[in-house]
Every structure is written in structure tokens, then in C-alpha cells.
Image (cartoon, grey):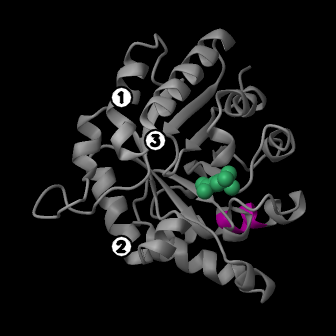
Amino acid sequence: APGPVRYVVGNWKMQLEHQQGMKLATGIADGLRAMGPIPVQTVVCPSFTQLYGVHEILEHADLPEDRLALGAQDCYPAPSGPFTGDISAQMLAGLGVKYVILGHSERRQNHHETDAIVRQKVKAATAAGLVPIVCIGEHLTERNEGRAASVLASQIEGSLTRDFRGMIAYEPVWAIGSGVMPSRRELCHKLKLISALLPMHLTADGQTIPLLYGGSVTAALAPSILSIPDLAGVLVGSASLQASSFLGIVKVA
Ligand code: PEP
């Protein structure tokens, strides 16, 4: 019998010139088509400026949306209004976007996004019909001081609505873009902790929330990560910028 659906989400960040982004999207679509049917939901999250172009490519890719879907990297809490330079969840949904990464540590850090702001964005995304992928994760000092559990608990409590329907990406900040990953033992422990925290905060069944891991995932490391039973998939940064490495991760998912 086929196992549960796995998720492989690519976060392109503020990378790639327009044409490089289009080429990457085409390469991923071609590669997925060649793989044939597999129970993996692949999601690509380009910059805002590349969403329309990538959507056009996915439209013509002859792949069902439950194989390859479009995601964004952020959205604004309000549906519309005088917010110069911002992009609403409604606008994204109108463009064919299905998923949105929220509360990524780079946004928490560079744009001073608090848990409360992330929660407003979760509400907006959900109202627009998008699936929020909420990032949580402790900093290195928090981990080393033994505070990871309380940080994760307060991020869960502060960032998620009680009726949250979406995905959680556990991204230890010290593992992002560093080439350093938690040991399998530590990752299992953190995922168990998150699974135990979710039902304490959510009215809906926390067991149905897919948990992703993100931080320095490569095709070489993916098999050991994805063999963790509590894990539904991975959120991938740098290794998602080349079709070959990204598809290498999809293959083992
Ligand atoms: C990320 O920033 O979401 C991420 C996982 O990045 P990387 O894979 O490059 O560590």
C-alpha cells in the first residue's frame, strides 16, 4: 500500500535572475514528469516577481497540482489596502499560489516579525485559501542554554491560530544555510516535542499537522532525514536552486 504523502518544499529566497528561475521551474517540472507518479507533493516557492512566470510554466507542465504546486515566501496580514510594497494572500491566491511560507527565521530576524504578526499572516493566508507553512526553530544560544523546548512552545502558542490547518517547518536557525544539521537523535527528540506541544495549543487534532524539517538538507543527507517516522517532509533552501539536487531529494522522499 502506498505510504502517506511526503512534502518537498523549495524555498528559492531572494535568489536567481528571472530567466534562471524560469529555467529551474521548467527543469523541475520536466524531471517530475519523467519520474512518473510518486506520492510526493513538491512545492516551489520563488520570489514574488517570479510567481507569475513560474505559474505559467506549471500550468503548461502537464502535471497534477498534487505533484507540483506553487508557493510564496510571505504575505501581508490585510487582504488589500494602502500598504505600499506589500503583497496580500488574496493576490497570491489569485495568481495560482497554494502554499505560503510564514515566519521564516530570516523574516523574523530581518523584518522584526513577531509571533503575533506571524499569527495574523496565518489568519490571512487561511482566509485566502492558502496552506500556511509556519517556520519555528531555536537559535544556537537558546539551544545551548537548554531553552529550545520553551522557545518552540512559545512560537507554537504565539504563531498559530487555535484552529490552525497547515504545516509546521522545524528549522533550527543554526542549521539554516550553515551545512550543520542536528543529529538524527536530536531531530527525533525535537519532532516528538513539537508533536506533543501541538495538541496542547490546537483545538483541532495536532496529529494531522504535517511536520517538515529544514536546515542544510541535501540529496545526500535526505535519506537519513526522511526515514524519521514523525517527519512528513523537508523544506529546502540552497539545494532547491538546482533541478538536479532538488529532484534528488524528491526521489528519496
Ligand atoms: C531555509 O532557509 O528554509 C533552508 C532550509 O535553507 P538551507 O536549506 O539553505 O539551509
In primary-sequence order, the first of circles 1 and 2 is 1
Q: CA distance from mark 1 to mark 2?
A: 29 Å
Instruction: Name the outermost residue toward the bottom.
Output: 145
In magenta stretch: residue 193: yes
Quadrant placement of the C terminus:
top right
Q: Quadrant of residue 151?
A: bottom right
Residue range highlighted in magenta: 190-194
* Towards the viewer: 170 or 248: 248
Q: CA distance from mark 3 to mark 1?
A: 10 Å
Mark 2 residue crowding within 10 angstroms, few (<14) / some (14–19) / many (20+): some
| Relative horizontal placement of residue 83, taking residue 110 as reference (left or right) | left
Q: Residues within 10 Å of mark 1 (few under 14, many from 20)?
A: some
Q: Secondary structure at mark 2?
A: helix
At label 3, which amino acid type do we have?
Pro
Q: Is residue 22 magenta?
A: no
Whether disc 3's CB lies below 8 Å from ligand 1 is answered no
Using the image, tell me which numbered label, if any, was put on residue 117. Answer: 2
Residue at numbered disc 3: 46
The residue wearing badge 1 is: 53
Instruction: Give the main secondary structure, helix, strand or loop, of the magenta stretch.
Output: helix
Whether residue 140 is situated above or below residue 85 in the rendered picture: below
Point 56% across, 71% down: residue = 200
Three-letter code, disc 1? Gly
Residue at point 38%, 68% (across, down) = 119
